[in-house]
Image (cartoon, helix red, strand yellow):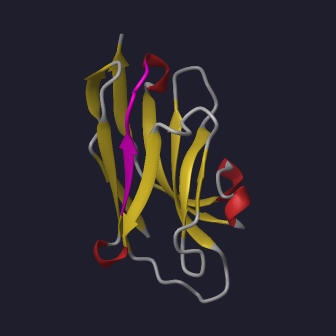
């Protein structure tokens, strides 16, 4: 399984960015709850869940971390095997490496790093004040 992120960069506070995650090599086994999620890791902080979008059987289900609710939106294009994270109203505290991940857990638990079975390599997002 490969997850490849793109779209990171430098943006001023209040600005927007859209991250993409291309997923390949994954075939659903028909049983386990798999979802695509975005996580982030800032210097000196623990990696945290940002958003997840439901996989097969959970289409349309989304969950967000408290710090990004109302500002970030996760979506997916199944035909392209790609997930997106639209980030609006960016703040300096959003600065981090953003990682795409394949998680295996009930949706409510899929924002926890322990649920991740595959990680992407990450893309840097820097928000200047």
Determine the residue positioned at 41% across, 59% down: 75
Question: Compared to 91, does 108 lie above or below?
Answer: below
Depth order, front residue of 7/1: 7
Determine the residue positioned at 49% across, 20% down: 93
Question: Compared to 12, does 55 lie above or below?
Answer: below
Looking at the image, the residue that sits furthest to the front is 70
Looking at the image, the residue that sits furthest to the top is 129
Determine the residue positioned at 55% across, 56% down: 52
Q: Which range of residues does the magenta coloring cover?
A: 83-91
User: In the visual, does 64 lie left or right of 18?
Assistant: right
Q: Where is residue 25 drawn, in percent x and y?
A: 39, 76
Q: Where is residue 110 drawn, in percent x and y?
A: 66, 58
Depth order, front residue of 14/115: 14
Looking at the image, the residue that sits furthest to the bottom is 30
Assess whether residue 8 is covered by the magenta stretch: no
Residue 125 is drawn in which quadrant?
top left
Image quadrant containing the C terminus:
top left
């Amino acid at each position: 399984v490969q997850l490849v992120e793109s779209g990171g960069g430098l943006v001023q506070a209040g600005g927007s960015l859209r991250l993409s995650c291309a997923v390949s090599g994954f075939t659903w086994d028909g049983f386990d709850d798999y979802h695509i999620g975005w996580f982030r890791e800032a210097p000196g902080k623990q990696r945290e869940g940002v958003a997840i979008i439901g996989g097969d059987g959970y289409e349309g289900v989304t969950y967000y971390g408290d710090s990004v609710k109302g500002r970030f939106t996760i979506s997916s294009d199944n035909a392209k095997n790609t997930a997106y994270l639209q980030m609006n109203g960016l703040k300096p505290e959003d600065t981090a490496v953003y990682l795409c991940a394949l998680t295996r857990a009930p949706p409510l638990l899929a924002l926890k790093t322990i649920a991740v079975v595959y990680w992407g390599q990450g893309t840097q997002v820097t928000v200047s004040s």
